[in-house]
Amino acid sequence: MQTNVIINGTQRRLELDPRTTLLDALRHHLGLSGSKKGCDHGQCGACTVMVNGRRINACLTLACMHDGDEVTTIEGIGQPGNLSALQEAFVSEDGFQCGYCTPGQICSATAMLEEIRNEWPSHVTDDLVGGAELTNEEISERMSGNLCRCSAYPNIVEAIRKAAGKGA
Amino acid sequence: MRPFDYIRADSAEAATRQVADGGIFIAGGTNLLDLMKLEVMAPEALIDINRLELNQIEETEDGGLRIGALVTNSDLANDTRVRRDWPVLSRALLAGASAQLRNKATTGGNLLQRTRCLYFYDRAMACNKREPGSGCAAREGFNRILAVLGTSEHCIATHPSDMAVAMRALGAKVETLKEDGETRQLTLDELYLLPGDRPDRETVLEVGELITGVVLPARVDGRQTYRKVRDRASYAFALVSVAGIVAMEDGRIARADLAFGGLAPKPWRDAQVEALLVGETPSEALFNKAADQLLAQARGFGDNDFKLLLARRTLVSVLTELTETRT
């Protein structure tokens, strides 16, 4: 069936079997292989993209459900020579080892920093009403939907802190 | 995934008719699509209700809130009114899943999510919920995450929601629209069925019946908390959880609304536990009596025997926190 989606600012028309997940549409039909398929069951976060500004697991949603939506993938966050502050920080802080989870980590962290700016609390925030500081505990809780099997977590946290300090 | 027809519903009324013939509603899809990939569920049609106008949170005349069925878990948890006046609900939501899933998962879908019993997910195993009459491999299997209350010889699955536990403690009501246009309100106790000899039937909802929203009653005085005990600190289902709303008056307990997750096939609430607490002076002995009452009919199945002690300790800890004098 036909679906029109705005991918990284460009209108794209897709003709897909309704079973196609947004992740498979991105990777196999649009050639955007930055978003990764880890578990394909919403457990690892490697497929994290932003839809209408919110981070979601692209593997657990059908492309046909996103007619008219705006999708931002890692390719839309930055490119070689024009990296986002988070991408630069992941490089400078060595925030990865094998790199497979990294696009999902960066998409997720990009949206997470926006959630902090909007004063969204988390499970570890003491005061539900007052907003939250970007402590290591807050970063770990808010990023728990992104697994890293190389366990580069300490450097991922450092990269996010560094980018947040620059107003990523 | 098995093939299906995809139909986008233009109105709630149309959706209830479109779903009637082997179809199923899809909202966030975070649980349904997972189950469809595993072919644990194989609906003939998906009725996409995401375009319906059910995504608002509105104040009701009596000071409560009406939460549209399509309000995401993120939007509900972060609503400033919910954070201020119904914090147990924000806390329960924020304790559930991951940020990515909360951005997609909806209020109605959260209520209707399926158990995470490993045997329900594994099509090679016997499961009366997935395939009625096939048996229950969980009773003799790896059952440490499964239920100790409300079970039957046919099923020991738990309901996995955190949100629904908080809603049960808050006395929320679920609003639905039936295929014939009739609407009704159900308490969470009324919505969910115990497994009995038909664990495949999980709610009283009829074919075509659509959850349109959830109504919270006005805020009540007292402290609220949601305590979730799990195998890791984030992004895991509850082994035991307690939603508590407790008010004190002259050193005695004036209100104790308590609901429990991780223990039963539905968010669990026991009026006798609450009756035993109200009017009494807080003490560890009293809290243990409440736990005795909660667990009077509880039984473990081997791996999950620990939940009896864990539930007791969690309840005592929550009641201690909610009744202690603050300095």
Image: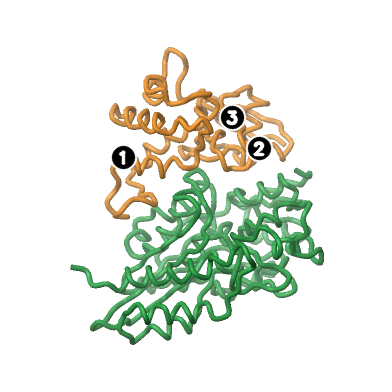
Chain colours: A orange, B green
Q: Which mark is residue A154?
A: none
Residue underneath mark 3: A36
Q: Please tell me whether residue B320 is drawn above or below residue A99 in the rendered image.
A: below
- Residue A48 image position (x, y, % from top left): 53, 35
Question: Furthest-top residue in view?
Answer: A81
**Same chain, labels 3 and 1:** yes
**Same chain, labels 1 and 2:** yes
Residue underneath mark 1: A134
Q: Residue at 75% across / 43% down in the picture?
A: B1
- Residue B168 image position (x, y, % from top left): 49, 70
Task: Residue type at mark 3: give it.
Answer: Lys
Q: Residue at 40% across / 41% down in the picture?
A: A140
- Residue A127 image position (x, y, % from top left): 29, 55
Residue underneath mark 2: A21
Mark closer to the chain start, 3 or 1: 3
Mark closer to the chain start, 3 or 2: 2
Label 3 residue SS: loop
Label 2 residue SS: loop
- Residue B86 image position (x, y, % from top left): 37, 65
Q: Residues within 10 Å of mark 1 (few under 14, many from 20)?
A: some
Task: Residue type at mark 2: give it.
Answer: Thr
* Near-viewer residue (A124 or B66): A124
Give how far apart the Cα atoms at labels 3 and 1 are. Answer: 27 Å
